[in-house]
Image (cartoon, rainbow, N blue to C red):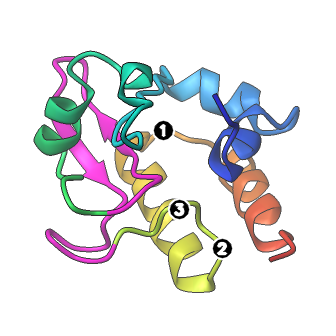
Amino acid sequence: MARTQLDKFIETPEIKPIVEKYFVFARLTVQEHEGETSLNSPGGDEVLAKTGGKDSGLPFFAFLDAKGGTIVNSRRQPGGANIGHPYAPEEIDWFLAMVKKAAPGIARDEAATLERYLRSQKQ
């Protein structure tokens, strides 16, 4: 399974402890090409649809509550464009808004660490 830019971000040493403090990360593989569909996570397409990611493009991500309900997802508005891995300033802004909505108790310095990393990326 190939690591995406989003995976690399989440696994970065200064980012990983913040993510793990506030979230449980689960990765699903969906929409693999013909001949590779055995790599798809069982039920992954259903989760993608339930969380608002059907026809959104990949990577798609969502923050869920303890019961599996969607708090917010990577579409900037319901049915809107998916930010994927946040690079552009408006995508980073939306990602930070998502984090604050999903983890309202996140410390200011932790949010600043996420922002600093994302805004320093080379495209």
Q: Residue at x 23, y 44 (%)?
A: 71
Residue type at the position of mark 2 = Tyr
Marks 1, 2: nearer the viewer:
2
- 77 vs 114, left or right, is left
What secondary structure do most residues of the magenta stretch adopt?
loop
Q: Look at the image and say whether residue 58 sits in the magenta stretch.
A: yes
Mark drawn on residue 87: 2
Percent across and percent down for residue 69 are 15, 32
Outermost residue to the bottom: 89
Outermost residue to the front: 35
Residue type at the position of mark 1 = Gly
Q: Secondary structure beneath disc 2?
A: loop
- Residue 43 lies, with reference to residue 55, above or below; the image says above
Residue assigned mark 1: 105
Q: Label 1 neighbourhood size at 10 Å, few (<14), some (14-19), many (20+)? A: few
Percent across and percent down for residue 50 are 11, 39
Residue assigned mark 3: 96
Identify which residue, 107 or 62, lies in the foreground.
62
Q: Residue at x 87, y 74 (%)?
A: 122
- Residue 55 lies, with reference to residue 63, above or below; the image says below
The first of marks 1 and 3 along the sequence is 3
Marks 1, 3: nearer the viewer:
3
- 76 vs 61, left or right, is left
| Residues rendered magenta in the picture | 57-81
Q: Look at the image and say whether residue 49 sits in the magenta stretch.
A: no
How many numbered circles are shown? 3
Percent across and percent down for residue 55 are 21, 61
Q: Secondary structure beneath disc 3?
A: helix
Identify which residue, 65 or 79, lies in the foreground.
79
Identify which residue, 24 or 28, lies in the foreground.
28
Question: Disc 1 to disc 2, how far (Cα)?
Answer: 24 Å
Q: In the rendered image, which quarter contains the C terminus? A: bottom right
